Image (cartoon, rainbow, N blue to C red):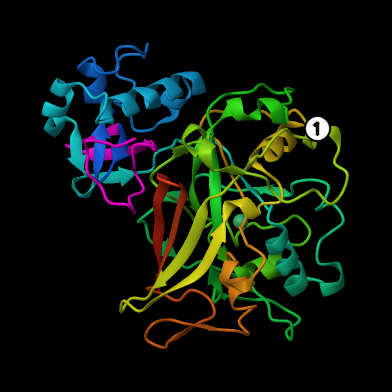
Amino acid sequence: MDSWVLYDNSCDFTIYNFPLGVAWYKEKYSVVSAIGDFVIDLDYLQQNGYLDPISLPKGIFSNQFINDFIGLGNETTKQVRERLIFLFDSKTAPKDFILRKDFYLIPISDVSLTLPLNIGDYTDFYSSREHATNVGIMFRDPANALLPNWLHLPVAYHGRSSSIQVSGHDIIRPNGQLKSDADPNPTYGQSKLVDFELEMAVVVSKNSTIGQQISTGDAGNYIYGMALFNDWSARDIQKWEYVPLGPFLSKNFASTLSPWIVSLEALKPFKVNGPESEKPLLPYLHYEGAQNYDIQLDVEIVSSTGANAVVSKSNHKYLYWNILQQLAHHTVNGCNIRVGDIYASGTISGPDSESFGSMLEISWQGTKPIKLSDGSERKFIQDGDTVIIRGFAQKNEIRVGFGEARATVISIK
Ligand code: MN
């Protein structure tokens, strides 16, 4: 397919994508999509009848969040995406629609992209075997890096939704309890080991009720799509606090979400098989077909002086537990989910050191610093450093990208 909107080969927002976001523009919030370097004013399209074949509540796009729209269900959101493909494909676009483009195409640089979701609950999984193994080796015991439950269930913790910020917001270096191995007692101070975690978040588009279990076969009906996610982590706080209940203050100070949510519909061409399960799985974790996604992910660090380095190249397909298994497990006890909830993958590390998804692993607890372009070294993230996560999937001419999730770490003294 070719769009009459021109963009180059490396564009994330192609005719195959149509992600959802929210823009602050002309003193109001609007649910928007994107193509090329433009956001698409969906409210204008609806008001002027261009979405008429689809039955939509009046004013659904005049909204600070995408929750109401995705809550209409995947069948409806799929129809809207197909309608957008029709309107923007040069073979099918109505002439009058193209002529009126200046009314609904707004340069992305002219708008402010805001947090697209009213996030209810947020869960962070731990579904990369390589990441869990690396952390197990460093934090616990190389001989028993994976704990016994890990190959039987998708391990997770409940995170904090209120501190999830959209790309572009600064991250304040946290304070907390720190304890070195040599010292029997902790001290209080600023975290010195602030780290990123390369993750993707899944966005829930359908409510379930308490007591209801969602099967892997049905889980896709509860998921709208995915976004880039950085689960900021303070490793020194984490190491001291995390036993026995898991991470708390080392994680809940901030997370960064990309402004664009890409639908599972758009990601269908990129489905691939995931790793084979090593242990026999309980029946509720069985699934059909290829359920991982071949999404290339990378992480770049840019210092305050502009020195930079791409420090990780990973892929969503490395996840041992897929997004359907995660949701089936999340609800197997009857826990309900709601539209706008998100659950993140956990750090996505691949098999080799270039694909590790956190500085903890890349620098191997600070023992192997990496170099930026000006020769300066990094073991963890310094004040003034900007961390940028990018992601896209590509198969022949079909390209679907996620934009970026970026944030700069600062200190408040
Ligand atoms: Mn995480």
Q: Nearer the viewer, residue 238 or 267?
A: 267
Q: Which residues are magenta?
A: 1-30
| Crowding at mark 1 (Cα within 10 Å: few <14, some 14-19, many 20+) | some
Q: Identify whether 295 is placed above or below 131.
A: above
Q: Position of residue 406 (x, y in %)?
A: 40, 59
Residue under the point 19% across and 36% down: 105
Write the residue at 78% across / 31% down. Answer: 333
Q: Is residue 65 above or below residue 237?
A: above
Which residue sits at x=12%, y=33%? 102
Q: Position of residue 153 (x, y in %)?
A: 79, 45
- Quadrant housing the N terminus: top left
Label 1 CB-ligand 1 distance < 8 A: no
Measured from the top left, where is residue 235 in percent x and y?
A: 61, 70
Of helix, strand and loop, which one carries label 1? helix
Q: Which residue is found at the position 21% from the left and 24% from the top?
A: 44
Q: Main secondary structure of the magenta part?
A: loop
